[in-house]
Image (cartoon, rainbow, N blue to C red):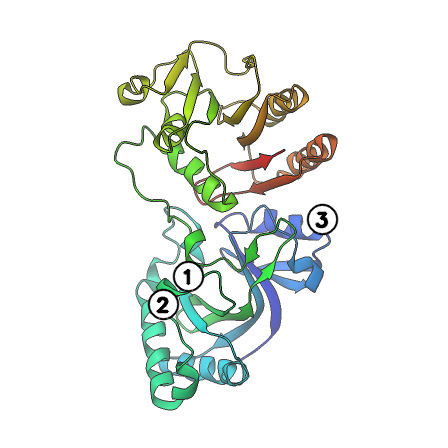
Amino acid sequence: MAKINTLNGYLCANGWEEALCQELVAAKAGEHFYSPAPGLVVGESSSAGLRYEPVFAGQWFPSCMEVEGESIADLIQALGNTLDPILDQNPLPWTLHCFTPDLYTEDSTYYEFLSGRSALLHEKFMQRMAKYRRRALEKYVDWSAIDEKRPCLLIQAVLVDTGYLWVSAAKRLKTESGRFVPFMRSNSPGSVAHDPQAPCRSYYKLEEAWQVAGIYPRKGEVCVDLGAAPGGWTWAALKRGARVVAVDFADLKPHVENHPHCEHSLENGYAFMPARTVDWMFCDMIVKPLATLGLLDRWLEQKACRKFVVNVKFRGKQPESILTAIEELRQKHQISHLIVKHLYYDRNEITLIGSL
């Protein structure tokens, strides 16, 4: 028999559960949150709290319910008992996504013992629907084919042990930043296309940041990449037709250096300031967090850029003071659009994507 408790939850990278819990409480998204399994945080958040966009959450998991079963057959039966009443009243297309929480953690091995079980859960549940719930199945759309612009019911089944999962069935809602959650496939972690010419791993961080924000450099726009070497972020902008001033004393990869739209400026990235306003400023330099925010502060004071992507690096996993400093900076400069996220490709760092 299923054991069910209704809560609201979030998925995050393994190891960042405490930071996410603290952030949610500090933002008054709810009074108490806890982590029942690595990569998953749940609590009793308000409807207004669900619209808050946490830095350390990779996915929303609203109205989640705990489901247990000794075997895969028991799990399928319990999951069906949980979802049948919801699907009976649902007028929308619906889709099902089965996975483990480490979907939001790069290079994780924690849930390796469940390898293949999520796919089996999906297969067996759909077989049950075809046999017993054919009318509800008529509204089903495969996760890979769902139209993200249309309203739908997103069912997420997160397997955390062989006989233990959490399930969420919810319509998408709009957050304070204007993004719709839960995210669909285009925002799936690790969905940035592999590029064999990418000069370094950091290339994927910038591509993910643009994907999350839904904004990209346009052909002919001017970008400044501070601390550019070996050229990962510069390469990402060049591929989109932008012109890039790559600021660094160190060498760029030859195919970046020799690109006709790349200007390599042998200067100190921390001190560099353009003569006129540019479209984008990028910064992925390894400096102390308040130094990075100080750099961004100077650029905003000088109105030196219209948009920016800045990566803030820090030690440990308790960045409350950094989040406070970011909020102070947002208020000081009245940044109209700012997304602050711990991205899939981020480690001990968070990424700021903003436009003025």
Instruction: Tell me, yes or no, whether the two marked residues, 3 and 2, touch with CB atoms within 8 Å.
Output: no
Instruction: Tell me, yes or no, whether the two marked residues, 1 and 2, touch with CB atoms within 8 Å.
Output: yes
- Tell me the kind of residue under disc 2: Ser
The image shows residue 242, relative to residue 191, as above or below, that is: above
Tell me residue 301's x, y (percent). Answer: 68, 21
- Tell me the kind of residue under disc 1: Thr
Disc 1 crowd rating (10 Å Cα; few below 14, some 14-19, many 20+) is many
| Secondary structure under the numbered disc 2 in the rendered image | helix
Q: In the drawing, what numbered circle is on residue 26?
A: 3
> Which residue appears farthest toward the bottom when viewing the image?
132
Tell me residue 159's x, y (percent). Answer: 43, 67
- Give the residue number, with chain letter if any, for mark 2: 118
Q: How far apart are the alpha carbons under marks 1 and 2?
A: 7 Å
Q: Residue at x 50, y 69 (%)?
A: 152
Instruction: Tell me, yes or no, whether the two marked residues, 1 and 3, touch with CB atoms within 8 Å.
Output: no
Q: How far apart are the alpha carbons under marks 3 and 2?
A: 34 Å
- Give the residue number, with chain letter if any, for mark 1: 100
Please tell me in which quadrant of the rendered image residue 125 appears.
bottom left
In the image, 330 versus 260, the foreground residue is 260
Tell me residue 287's x, y (percent). Answer: 54, 22
In the image, 30 versus 302, the foreground residue is 302
| Secondary structure under the numbered disc 1 in the rendered image | loop
